Image (spheres, helix red, strand yellow):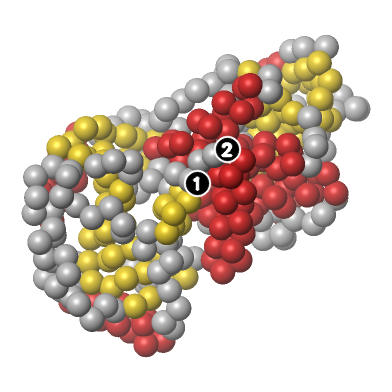
Amino acid sequence: MTTIDYVVVGQGVCGSFVAWNLEKANQSFIMIDKPDPLSSSRVAAGIINPVTGRRIVQTWMIDTLLDHAGKAYAQLGEALDVEAMTQKNSVSFFPSPQMLQAFIGRLEEDAAYLSFPADQEKYRNQFRYDFGYGEISPCYAVNLAELLPALRARIKNNNRLIEETFDHSLLQLTDEGITYKDIRAKKIIFCDGAGAMHNPWFRNLPFACNKGEALIIKSDHLPTDKVFKKSLSLAPLAGNLFWAGSSYEWDFQDDKPSAIFRQKTEKHLREWIKSPFEITDHLASLRPATVERKPFVGIHPHHPQIAILNGMGAKGCSLAPYFADQLVDHLVKNAPIMEEADVSRFRRILGKDARTM
């Protein structure tokens, strides 16, 4: 029997930061994760944008999150010898006069993160646009494509990784903690993304998972120093590749790429981008969003052996570093978790599962 402090289930951006923080806190752990190239963390563009929605409002806690993310990614990137995060401001082309006026209105109310560049002709050689553009700054691109595999290799090299699907039926709760197969630990931390909808301990939480899709395109003629947006986002990846997406589908049949999305997105891109490009891939995944648009963080209110970090939706790259830090500090130092995010706010509905386990 192997005895450790924690079992961590899932190695998306949430599980990765939990593992990293446990390592820094000198806590022993084993991560259980089956490789999935189409998990939401690996399909995402990794963009941190301080402004969101058609109303162009600041995202929840953005000042705090940006400061924390900058430090967290820099530290993790240095440890892994990876450029973890780079600034890539968002150039937003207005699809209509109404959106132009909405942007100007927000700029007059609160200019934080927003600007209206004087040179509105700057991108005429690359893109077709009729109503100008605004810029959102600072925005950041997280290098998930290198960061997550590099951290996984570190965990694996330290003999802390089991590459398999977690079997909930084998999890046993004890007075001292948990057992799973031949592992004994104080607690288990679920960072299982959309899989939490089928997790018997947390399936009653108010998840609102949605499906996202994106195309990967290749072009030698597009700028790589910005993220561009016109109804959809075009984010630079390594080399001459770009991520084009994403959709938010709330009524979906499966998590597979759809012909409708590809046709619609390709048509939009060819109308918007002036230079030729090639589609190299089509990706799809489910985002673990929540009804309240607030994450689920903390210890199960009826089972102190079980914890969760989940529900980040499309904001995982900004939320995960901050709340992984809070969770690990809570586990190790008994520090408080933000009330708005603490999973104990769902004590009643989680009690339904507690009575049937």
Front residue (pair 55, 73): 73
Q: In this figure, what is the number of numbered marks?
A: 2
Left or right of 84? Residue 188 is right
Under circle 2, the secondary element is helix
Q: Which of the image's four quarters has the C terminus?
A: top right
CA–CA distance in space, label 1 to label 2: 9 Å
Name of the residue lying farthest toward the right? 175
Check disc 1 and report its element: helix, strand or loop. Answer: loop
- Mark 2 is surrounded, within 10 Å at the Cα level, by few (under 14), some (14 to 19) or many (20 or more) other residues, namely some
Q: Mark 2 points at which residue?
A: 80
Return the x and y of residue 92 as percentages of the image width and height.
Answer: 27, 66
Q: Residues within 10 Å of mark 1 (few under 14, many from 20)?
A: many
Q: Mark 1 points at which residue?
A: 84
Can you see residue 46? Answer: yes
The quarter of the picture where the N terminus appears is: top right
Residue 244 appears left or right of 339: left
Direction from residue 143 to residue 332 in the image, left or right: right
| 341 w.r.t. 145: above or below | below
Residue 81: horizontal and vertical position, in percent?
54, 39
**Front position in the image: 327 or 174:** 327
- Height in image: 133 above or below 146? below
- x and y percentages locating residue 257 in the rendered image: 28, 32
Q: Quadrant of residue 227?
A: bottom left
Circles 1 and 2 in contact, beta carbons < 8 Å: yes
Compared with residue 41, is residue 6 higher up or lower down, i.e. above or below?
Answer: above
Residue 354 seen: no
